[in-house]
Image (tube, rainbow, N blue to C red):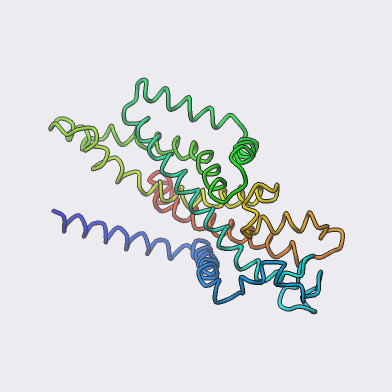
Amino acid sequence: MTALAWGRRKRALAQTWAEYRRDREGMTGLLVLGGFVAVALLAPLLADDAQLSAVNTTGNEVWAPPGEHPPLGTDSLGRPIYDQLVYGSQVSLLVGIAATLIAIVIGTVVGVSAGFFGGWVDAVLNRLSEWFLVIPFIPLAIVLAAILGPSLRNIIFVIGVTSWPVTARLIRAQVLTIKQRLYVERSRALGASSLHVMGRHVLPNVAPLVIANATLTVPVAILSETVLSFLGLSDPLRVSWGSMLEDAFSAGALGREAWWWYLPPGLCVIAVVLAFTLVGRALEAILDPRLRAGRAG
């Protein structure tokens, strides 16, 4: 039975990949995303982390444009923009992925529990989700980040615990449909426990929706990190694309028309967010049963 189940999963993965490859936008997003991930992983080989500290860049000209200090010029402290951009990719992607994992775990637990058990459990978890949805996300994240203090760990935690309600409501709706199916009722009739039914039948069926929703949550987390960093609530010892934008704004890069300082991190944020969105939309169209049925029709 185990070998048969693994065989079905391999065939399902192969079919999913075949459908995904036919989606041009999804493949474009995947290639762009792969490029940024490669830059983040190879950052020590592509850039010099010593250049991130102003103590080591006293010999560099400040506010140097790309023509005078290739490839991307320097900032007000003489730090090369290129090195900051490369190492900033690590923090931005780490925050986006780690915060998304927290949000997905919380959202999955809440959504499955609310949809499967119903009753007072569903009522309480629904009220909790609605409370998070009613309060504006950015102000809530700013307040929590200000209370906990500026650090990378706190930024990840804040974004994660404020981003789960949408995931929870999507999964709850899917679970309400799944638990009415005949194989779930048959499993219950045979004496299967709630944990067995959830682990064996519910979770595997909501997994595609969880994966698709995760890829759409990452760009939201990256944008949230950029906003919080721009407001000075990120780790002051770590460089991210958001902190680069905040430094550029504080130093008056706009007034000096130092486009080489604020334009590259801004474009990187846009490119990564767009790449994750394209990948997420492609996966959602393939893995979401409702969208898949619509495409087939």
In the image, residue 172 sits, relative to residue 34, either above or below, namely above
Q: Is residue 297 visible?
A: no
Q: Is residue 39 visible?
A: yes
Q: Nearer the viewer, residue 54 or 138?
A: 54
Residue pictured at 22% horizontal, 35% vertical: 182
Image location (x, y in percent) of residue 203: 31, 43
The answer to whether residue 53 is left or right of residue 157 is: right
Q: Nearer the viewer, residue 41 or 192?
A: 41
Direction top: furthest residue: 120
Direction front: furthest residue: 55
The answer to whether residue 170 is left or right of residue 178 is: right
Q: Number of marks in the image?
A: 0
Residue 119 found in image quarter:
top left
Image location (x, y in percent) of residue 13: 32, 60
Image location (x, y in percent) of residue 6: 21, 58
Image location (x, y in percent) of residue 85: 65, 66
Residue pictured at 58% horizontal, 52% vertical: 222
Q: Nearer the viewer, residue 183 or 231?
A: 231
In the image, residue 112 sits, relative to residue 211, either above or below, namely above
Residue pictured at 61% horizontal, 74% vertical: 47
In the image, residue 71 sits, relative to residue 225, either above or below, namely below
